[in-house]
């Protein structure tokens, strides 16, 4: 009986240890190992797998299971597109993704990226659709044709740059959302951020700077800037149109070539303890747009005599008693 009990105990111990043992893999792409084969090795199992990758891996990769961690060594490079379809609990660390197509292409997936550099891809750095969520911490999406394109998906940036992409930095479509903290969306060839079709964003301690256009909000989109700057964009800083709304708290909109903010077509801007200074024009309000200022907000020092201009009887601004706003050219300055 004692021998039987010992044997059973050993078998149970081995079985319990199997998932942890099976989950660890090492891939050296420079030595000819295949990262794709390592990804496929866990097919049919729900156990999490962890793959440590070194070297440069060439070719597109396809990931269709949950619970995968791809861990580089800081010098690891994937030269191709990483495709995720219906995958959850994906973790990617310490590597670079580059190549002739997309960087990351994902649908109905969830991924967390740490110290990942998505650079110099010929298409979007990240393209996510179908309720995908991606979180990028201490990373970059730089130098791609397009930075990030979201369709019914969510992006969370922390200490990350989306800079110097050929076209748009971040494009939010169809109820997509962006949350960015201590991040930069700068130097992009067209728009820093475009929010369209009921999309939204929240920026805290971040910058949207030196793009051709700063932020464009279209078709009932919404945004919130907290302690953030929209500055030095070649054309406008922020454009709101088509029933869109923006709240700016302790923000700075400055140095933009044309309008600091253009509020158009039933859209609404709220400025609280914020400054719109040193732009081509301060605030332009057209086609039933509305603006409200609260606290020590300033609209001053913009080019031209009038700091706020309205077009039409339905466009207006309401200025709080603590705010300092330069000359206003509106038929009805208050609501």
Image (cartoon, rainbow, N blue to C red):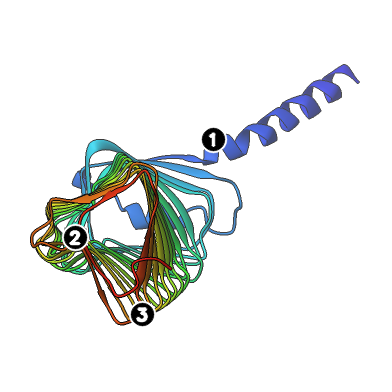
Upstream in sequence: badge 2 or badge 1? 1
At 85% from the left and 23% from the top, the residue drawn is 5
At 19% from the left and 60% from the top, the residue drawn is 307
- Of badges 3 and 2, nearer the viewer stands 2
Residue occupied by mark 3: 265
Q: Classify 270 as above or below 75.
A: below
Quadrant position of residue 95: top left
The tag on residue 307 is 2
Rendered location of residue 332, percent (x, y): 35, 72
Upstream in sequence: badge 1 or badge 3? 1
Rendered location of residue 268, percent (x, y): 40, 67
| Quadrant into which the C terminus falls | bottom left
Give whichever of 297, 135 is nearer the camera. 297
The tag on residue 21 is 1
At 51% from the left and 41% from the top, the residue drawn is 23
Q: CA distance from mark 2 to mark 1?
A: 67 Å
């Amino acid at each position: 009986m004692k021998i039987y009990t010992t044997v059973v105990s050993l078998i149970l111990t081995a079985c319990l240890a199997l998932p942890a043992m099976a989950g660890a893999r090492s891939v050296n792409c420079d030595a000819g190992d295949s990262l794709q084969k390592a990804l496929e090795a866990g097919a049919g199992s729900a156990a999490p797998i962890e793959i440590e990758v070194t070297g440069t891996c060439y070719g597109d990769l396809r990931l269709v299971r949950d619970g995968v961690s791809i861990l580089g060594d800081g010098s690891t490079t994937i030269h191709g597109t990483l495709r995720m379809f219906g995958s959850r609990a994906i973790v990617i660390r310490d590597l670079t993704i580059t190549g002739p197509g997309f960087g990351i292409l994902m649908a109905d997936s969830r991924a967390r990226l740490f110290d990942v550099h998505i650079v110099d891809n010929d298409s979007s750095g990240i393209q996510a659709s179908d309720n995908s969520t991606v979180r990028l911490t201490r990373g970059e999406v730089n130098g791609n044709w397009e930075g990030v394109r979201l369709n019914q998906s969510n992006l969370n940036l922390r200490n990350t740059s989306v800079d110097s992409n050929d076209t748009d930095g971040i494009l939010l479509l169809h109820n997509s959302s962006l949350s960015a903290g201590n991040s930069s969306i700068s130097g992009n060839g067209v728009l820093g951020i475009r929010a369209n079709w009921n999309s939204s964003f929240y920026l805290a301690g971040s910058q949207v700077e030196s793009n051709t256009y700063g932020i464009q909000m279209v078709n009932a989109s919404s945004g919130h800037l907290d302690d953030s700057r929209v500055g030095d964009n070649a054309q406008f800083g922020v454009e709101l149109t088509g029933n869109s709304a923006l709240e700016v708290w302790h923000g700075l909109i400055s140095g933009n070539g044309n309008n600091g903010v253009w509020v158009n077509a039933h859209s609404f801007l709220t400025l609280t303890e914020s400054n719109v200074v040193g732009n081509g024009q301060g605030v332009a309000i057209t086609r039933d747009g509305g603006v409200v200022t609260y606290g020590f907000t300033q609209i001053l020092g913009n080019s031209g005599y009038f700091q706020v201009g309205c077009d039409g009887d339905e466009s207006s601004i309401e200025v709080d008693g603590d705010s300092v706003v330069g000359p206003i050219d509106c038929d009805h300055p208050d609501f």
